[in-house]
DNA sequence: CTAAACTTTCAGAAAATACTGAAAATACAA
DNA sequence: TTGTATTTTCAGTATTTTCTGAAAGTTTAG
């Protein structure tokens, strides 16, 4: 509850970054606080640690819950709620990305879908329609890929990331070894 | 310059999404306008199309330039500047992601680096330090991976995305076929 | 039930962000 | 040069977002 200067700095930094990550300062600070704390904290603990109002804490907790970044813990014989980070750093990151995709990609994708549907008979300049189609296809590709990645085991995903673009080389080789379907999907320079 | 209702809607949508994508409404709208326009537009065209002030347009143009999302075109014998989207949808998306990484990841990574350095002699609770280290490692992994992806040819990257988690299967197989270095990196369940 | 302990809500205040429009600066043709 | 067309800047205003704190709501022990 009493924070070292170093921790305090990190928490303030997370607060600053909060808005860039899709939430507000308080939510960012509280997420940091709970991630760095080795024990669950009560709402009052949080308000005191960060010098913010109790109401603000309550709203931010709701937000963190809606992002599934925290969970509530109750001690028998104690009326207070205690809060802690809902998983490992990896899991929390996945959760943040998932939620951001929902807010930053999905609405546009569905907008594009309906526009491209609706204007079957073209009342739109050709170039505009084409660009819309391209954005649509890109977002759709991204969405499927993202889904797939979310469902991979963390170790596998990490291994894949470590491989980086090396994966391209491996795939080209594999492609040569396996003369079957989907060859076209690999592309060639 | 005179927009169909359909286009108008998409542009308004991009405006709404703007703040979630890291810029403001005007910048979002102008990006959409220029992406959908099949010819370069002058600042006055833009201000008129979107019913916003000339000053606002000027500031948003500066912002779009700093993101490298637009470029300026000049007609000989015409004093006006004309603006257009700086590349294909794919290139623009890459540019946006690149810039967002700079703003959303890099500052935190460097903050973590210096904190983890500085507090070599531990004045920080063990758990907090460990969490910081995990966040650091994750962001670093992400950064390298992201860099690698940015440098791949678009066709290759697209092919890779289309493959989705199928890539995992292919890699496991490859791993069995190639009994050499880095095997550990693939992981195993 | 009642009262204490705790949480949530929300109207209004404060802070942060975006936008306007007029003035200053710049670019260019003659 | 000078005059005109164009762009940029920025002080002030408007809008949006966040935060506070008091009141209303909820839960639970007795």
Image (spheres, coloured by chain):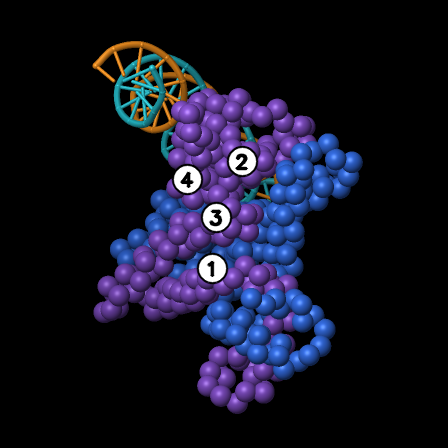
Chain colours: A blue, B purple, C cyan, D orange
Residues under labels 4 and 1: Cα distance?
20 Å
Disc 1 to disc 2: CB gap under 8 Å = no
Is residue B68 placed above or below B124 in the rendered structure?
A: above
Residue beneath the point at 65% across and 51% down: A137
Q: Residues within 10 Å of mark 3 (few under 14, many from 20)?
A: some
Q: Position of residue A109 (x, y in %)?
A: 65, 46
Image quarter of residue B114: bottom left
Residue B65's tag is 4
Residue at mark 1 shares a chain with residue at mark 2: yes
- Please state the chain letter of the residue tagged with numbered disc 1 in the rendered image: B
Q: Is residue B151 left or right of residue A1?
A: right
- Of the numbered discs 1 and 2, the one sitting upstream in the chain is 2
Disc 2 to disc 3: CB gap under 8 Å = no
**Which residue position is annotated with label 1?**
B150
Residue at mark 4 shares a chain with residue at mark 1: yes
- Of the numbered discs 4 and 1, the one sitting upstream in the chain is 4
- Of the numbered discs 1 and 3, the one sitting upstream in the chain is 3
**Which residue position is annotated with label 2?**
B34
Q: Position of residue B24 (x, y in %)?
A: 47, 36
Residues under labels 3 and 4: Cα distance?
12 Å
**Which residue position is annotated with label 3?**
B96
Q: Is residue A109 left or right of residue B59?
A: right
Which is nearer the eye, A129 or A96? A129
Residue sitting farthest toward the bottom? B179
Image quarter of residue A149: bottom right
Residues under labels 4 and 2: Cα distance?
13 Å
- Please state the chain letter of the residue tagged with numbered disc 4 in the rendered image: B
Disc 3 to disc 4: CB gap under 8 Å = no
Q: Secondary structure at mark 1?
A: helix
Residues under labels 1 and 2: Cα distance?
24 Å
């Amino acid at each position: 509850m009493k924070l070292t200067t170093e921790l305090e700095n990190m928490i303030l930094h997370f607060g600053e970054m909060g808005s860039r990550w899709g939430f507000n300062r308080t939510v960012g600070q509280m997420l940091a606080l709970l991630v760095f704390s080795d024990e669950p904290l009560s709402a009052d603990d949080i308000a005191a640690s960060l010098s913010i109002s109790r109401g603000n804490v309550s709203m931010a907790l709701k937000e963190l819950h809606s992002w599934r970044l925290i969970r509530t813990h109750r001690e028998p014989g104690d009326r207070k709620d205690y809060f802690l980070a809902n998983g490992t750093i990896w899991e929390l990151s996945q959760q943040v990305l998932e939620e951001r995709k929902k807010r930053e990609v999905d609405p546009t994708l569905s907008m594009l879908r309906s526009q491209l549907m609706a204007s079957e008979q073209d009342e739109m300049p050709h170039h505009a329609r084409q660009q819309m189609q391209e954005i649509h296809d890109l977002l759709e590709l991204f969405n499927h890929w993202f889904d797939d990645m979310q469902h991979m085991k963390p170790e596998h995903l990490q291994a894949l990331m470590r491989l980086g673009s090396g994966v391209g080389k491996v795939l080209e080789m594999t492609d040569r070894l396996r003369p079957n379907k989907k060859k076209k999907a690999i592309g060639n320079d």
